């Protein structure tokens, strides 16, 4: 099969966890696709499989069953070493708790992926990204000097520095008040207009319903 059209193409995505002698199906045959420029939200109550689905399509964890393409690369059967490359070249992660390093400035936090990728030669680009996420004036501030919305925008800047094609956001506004939520969603819109595929797992139905498409999970299955 070839996948020229979708940023992600997944069929029958299944993840089984072993609990003692029992099998727990965290995902049970989910079909999932997203195109470049699209925003898709994933909703459903706690434990329904949202994070597991993000971890699967983000190549942070391996499938028990199913077929998954990231762009043109079939990743379902890749080894960890090769998955790391696919992940680094394609995917940016954004989490509810930001995971910023408190002793580093906004700019230094966003620079970290370039450090790990040994691409500090590209660090000028980080300043452009800060303009894009609306934090141009806050480059040298510490996370503790900023509000939650700004902290999440630093985390988004950090997710963008390796020029991903896909952003995966797990409850990205879970810790934010409504004005900051608006700004974060507005930023996702802008990134989608640039052609990124954006997946947002969230409890927040108001936010989720503004995505181009909403997928509802229950017990590891899609229940639209
Ligand atoms: N690493 C793990 N080991 C065992 N069970 C897990 C693991 N991760 C998730 N699960 C289980 O899989 C199900 C789906 O979890 P999760 O994807 O975190 O749901 P959500 O993000 O929607 O709250 C839950 O029953 C959860 O307990
Ligand atoms: Mg979760």
Image (cartoon, rainbow, N blue to C red):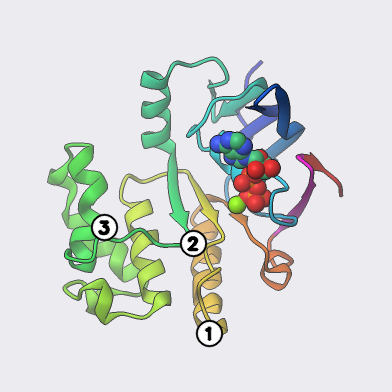
Tell me the residue that label 1 is attached to: 179
Cβ–Cβ under 8 Å for marks 3 and 1 = no
On-image quarter of the N terminus:
top right
| The disc label shown at residue 96, or none | 2
Cβ–Cβ under 8 Å for marks 2 and 1 = no
Choose top left, top right, bottom left or bottom right for residue 7: top right
Q: Report the mark closest to the observer, 2 or 3.
A: 2
Residue 5 vs residue 92: left or right?
right
- Crowding near the residue tagged with mark 1, few <14, some 14–19, many ≥20 C-alpha atoms within 10 Å: few
**Residue 61 visible in rendering:** yes
* 130 vs 177: above or below: above
Cβ–Cβ under 8 Å for marks 2 and 3 = no
Choose top left, top right, bottom left or bottom right for residue 170: bottom right
Q: Earlier in the sequence, mark 3 or mark 1?
A: 3
* Magenta segment includes 154: no
Q: Position of residue 204 (x, y in %)?
A: 68, 68
- Crowding near the residue tagged with mark 2, few <14, some 14–19, many ≥20 C-alpha atoms within 10 Å: some
């Amino acid at each position: 099969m070839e996948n020229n059209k979708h940023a992600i193409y997944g069929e029958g995505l299944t993840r089984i966890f072993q609990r003692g002698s029992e099998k727990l199906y965290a995902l049970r045959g989910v079909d999932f696709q997203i195109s470049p420029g699209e925003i898709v939200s994933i909703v459903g109550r706690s434990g329904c499989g949202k994070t597991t689905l993000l971890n699967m399509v983000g190549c942070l964890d391996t499938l028990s069953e199913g077929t998954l393409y990231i762009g043109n690369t079939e990743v379902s059967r890749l080894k960890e070493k090769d998955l790391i490359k696919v992940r680094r070249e394609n995917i940016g992660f954004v989490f509810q708790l930001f995971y910023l390093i408190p002793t580093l400035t906004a700019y230094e936090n966003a620079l970290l992926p370039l450090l790990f990728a040994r691409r500090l030669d590209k660090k000028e680009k980080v300043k452009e990204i800060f303009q894009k996420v609306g934090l141009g004036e806050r480059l040298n501030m510490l996370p503790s000097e900023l509000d939650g919305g700004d902290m999440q925008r630093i985390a988004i800047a950090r997710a963008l520095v390796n020029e991903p094609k896909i952003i995966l956001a797990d409850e990205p506004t879970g810790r934010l008040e409504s004005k900051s939520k608006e700004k974060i969603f507005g930023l996702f819109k802008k990134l989608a207009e640039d052609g990124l595929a954006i997946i947002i797992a969230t409890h927040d139905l108001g936010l989720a319903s503004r995505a181009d498409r909403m997928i509802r999970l229950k017990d590891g299955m899609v229940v639209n």
